[in-house]
Image (cartoon, rainbow, N blue to C red):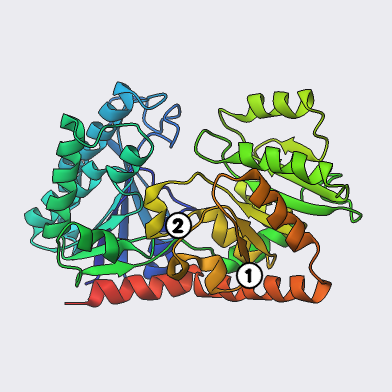
């Protein structure tokens, strides 16, 4: 089990879940190749602008094969064709590396075509097939009203999902309720494993000290800084935070300042809203390079995990930012109500979870944490660090290696 091929449409050298796994596995004696598309996540940058079918780059012993795929914008036809480019290209380009026949194919689902290509490769090489689910396809699309469950496309995706779940040797889910979901489909759950997303604590602590962001709001020690980092889109629930800020202001808590780092389709609208309503305890910042996030979070007093009320939340969550929040050693507040057994904030007692889609509940939760004693806040922050240690990528790689070595 020495040659591992990891398939992830958006993988890249230097960062990300699968690069971290590849890096740690390489140090343990494995030969790891990443297979990714040549386009960046937003589709408007391409590593291949000539007739080449692929390019190979190597960093710290890890080889990444970028497969040519067309540019796209948005979520329309061109993005679907981009996915097809990657899946079909993967089946062709992989033949160039037959001399290093894989012992394991590990296919991660940004989209289900990666699974299908992974299954075909596993059949070709008669090797172990691990399918990883990061988002439920098509369940997530149905929950967000992007497709109808009974539409032709919906039925095809559900059929493909069930096919892969039956055919894979092992199933990895990045959220804790994977077994619940697989069981609901009537499929054997004995092959289901759980590896959430995580954080590289060594890298986090290094960046916290080395990558300092000068910001007057962060440097203001006279305010209680509530920080949100990430996308500001339709499904991120930042509008509830803005409304909660207004409630906090009207309640007379002038010392609480909400700082939002990120970009997205809703940002301009929300900025206009706070200006119109004179909500002066919220400040929108621009997106920053991820290397600055550890420092930003280290200067916060409370970190925010936001989202909408979706039925799929019952299976648990795996947002990357949550593990950065844990690593900061600060309390966390979430408005993503989960089953108790899947709520990591409750499990580690490192903050509180309030009702979904309720500005009042979010405002009251922020005020509750603000009003806690210094000792209690310190205790919650200490528990966050304990959680971070459990989700360090070295620990997560231990779990992955065990799955690789299982019969």
Q: Residue at x 14, y 60 (%)?
A: 186
Residue 375 occupies quadrant: bottom right
**Where is residue 47 drawn, in percent x and y?**
40, 33
Q: Is residue 256 above or below residue 22?
A: above
177 left or right, relative to 101: right
Residue 163 relative to residue 106: left or right: left
Mark sitting earlier along the chain (2/1): 2
User: Looking at the image, can residue 248 be seen?
Assistant: yes
**373 in relation to 258, above or below:** below
What residue do we see at 63% from left, 75% from top? Answer: 383
**Disc 1: which residue:** 350
Q: Is residue 137 above or below residue 147?
A: below
- In front here: 263 or 294? 263
Q: Crowding at label 2, few (<14), some or many (≥20) Cα neighbours within 10 Å?
A: some
The residue singled out by tag 2 in the image is 318
User: Percent x, y for residue 332?
Assistant: 64, 61
Q: Residue 127, percent across and down?
A: 12, 63
């Amino acid at each position: 089990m020495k040659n591992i091929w990891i398939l992830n449409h958006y993988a890249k050298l230097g960062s990300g879940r699968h690069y971290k796994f590849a890096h740690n596995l390489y140090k343990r004696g494995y030969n790891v190749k990443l297979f990714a598309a040549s386009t960046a996540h937003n589709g408007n940058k391409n590593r291949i602008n000539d007739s080449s079918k692929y390019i190979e780059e190597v960093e710290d012993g890890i080889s990444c094969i970028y497969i040519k795929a067309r540019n796209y914008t948005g979520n329309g036809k061109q993005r679907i064709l981009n996915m097809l480019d990657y899946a079909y290209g993967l089946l062709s380009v992989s033949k160039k590396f037959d001399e290093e026949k894989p012992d394991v194919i590990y296919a991660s689902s940004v989209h289900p075509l990666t699974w299908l290509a992974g299954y075909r490769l596993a059949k070709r090489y008669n090797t172990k097939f691990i399918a990883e689910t990061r988002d439920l396809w098509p369940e997530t699309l149905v929950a967000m009203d992007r497709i109808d469950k009974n539409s032709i496309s919906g039925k095809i995706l559900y059929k493909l999902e069930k096919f892969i779940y039956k055919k894979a040797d092992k199933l990895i889910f990045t959220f804790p309720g994977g077994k619940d979901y697989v069981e609901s489909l009537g499929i054997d759950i004995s092959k289901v494993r759980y590896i959430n997303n995580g954080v590289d604590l060594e890298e986090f602590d290094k960046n916290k000290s080395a990558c300092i962001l000068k910001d007057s709001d962060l440097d203001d020690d006279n305010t209680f800084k509530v920080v949100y980092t990430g996308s500001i889109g339709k499904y991120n629930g930042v509008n509830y935070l803005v409304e909660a800020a207004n409630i906090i202001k009207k309640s007379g808590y002038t010392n609480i300042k909400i700082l939002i780092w990120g970009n997205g389709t809703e940002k301009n609208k929300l900025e206009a809203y706070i200006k119109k309503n004179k909500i002066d305890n919220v400040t929108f910042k621009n997106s920053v390079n991820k290397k600055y996030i550890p420092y930003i979070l280290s200067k916060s007093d409370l970190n925010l995990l936001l989202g909408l009320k979706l039925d799929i939340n019952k299976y648990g969550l795996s947002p990357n930012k949550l593990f950065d929040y844990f690593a900061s050693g600060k309390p966390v507040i979430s408005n993503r109500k989960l089953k108790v057994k899947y709520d990591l904030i409750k499990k580690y007692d490192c903050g509180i979870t309030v009702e979904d889609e309720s500005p009042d509940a979010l405002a009251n939760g922020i005020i509750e944490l603000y009003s806690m004693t210094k000792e209690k806040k310190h205790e919650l922050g200490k528990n966050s660090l304990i959680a971070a240690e459990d989700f360090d990528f070295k620990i997560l790689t231990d779990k992955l290696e065990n799955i690789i070595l299982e019969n």
